[in-house]
Amino acid sequence: QVQLVESGGGLVQPGESLTLSCAVSGNILMIRYMAWYRQTADKPREVVADISNGGATNYLDSVKGRFTISRDNAQNTVYLRMNNLKPEDTAVYYCNVELWTEDSFGGYWGQGTQVTVSS
């Protein structure tokens, strides 16, 4: 059984930083793809950043230069370092992975962690 546990969200002021973590556990053979999404009450879920097994990254235009996604393959963990946070970054952030187990290939979601940017 695959489990994703997210941590690191919270309430910060504009300009401050946060780092989100998502630890993946279970009978994992390899994690092909890891990503962070976010969602607000009035917008659909959108991909913020993703990273391939080889380390190639992509970012939402509005976070380029402020957010950095990284992964630790030995620990099956993905991180999102968020600098210079803005009120419009307020959302629930979700971790998403695509991976192989001994039985199958599939996509999995974390439970979500709230990030609130407010003065």
Image (spheres, rainbow, N blue to C red):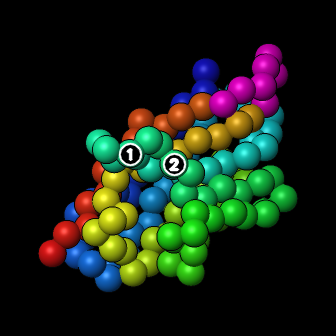
In the rendered image of this protein, does residue 19 appear above or below residue 91? below
Please state which of residues 65 and 70 is positioned toward the viewer in this rendering. Answer: 65
Looking at the rendered structure, the kind of residue marked 1 is Lys
Please state which amino acid type lies under the numbered disc 2: Glu
Identify which residue is drawn at 77% across, 54% down. 52
**Label 1 belongs to which residue?**
43
* Residue 48 percent across, percent down from the top left: 54, 57
Q: Where is residue 79 in the image (x, y as percent from the top left)?
A: 55, 60
Instruction: Report whether residue 6 is seen.
Output: no
Q: Magenta stretch? A: 100-107
Q: Is residue 90 magenta?
A: no
Q: Quadrant of residue 111?
A: top left
Instruction: Give percent across and percent down for residue 80.
Output: 52, 63
Instruction: Quadrant for the N terminus, please.
Output: top right
> Can residue 51 be spotted in the picture?
yes
How many residues crowd around disc 2 within 10 Å: few (fewer than 14), some, or many (20 or more)? some
Marks 2, 1: nearer the viewer: 1
Please count the marks in the image.
Answer: 2
Numbered circle sitting on residue 106? none
Residue 46 — which label? 2
**Circle 1 sits in a helix, a strand or a loop, which is it?**
strand
User: Which residue is depicted at the point 34% across and 53% down?
Assistant: 91
Q: Which residue is drawn at 57% across and 69% down?
A: 61
Q: Are marks 2 and 1 in contact (CB under 8 Å)?
A: yes
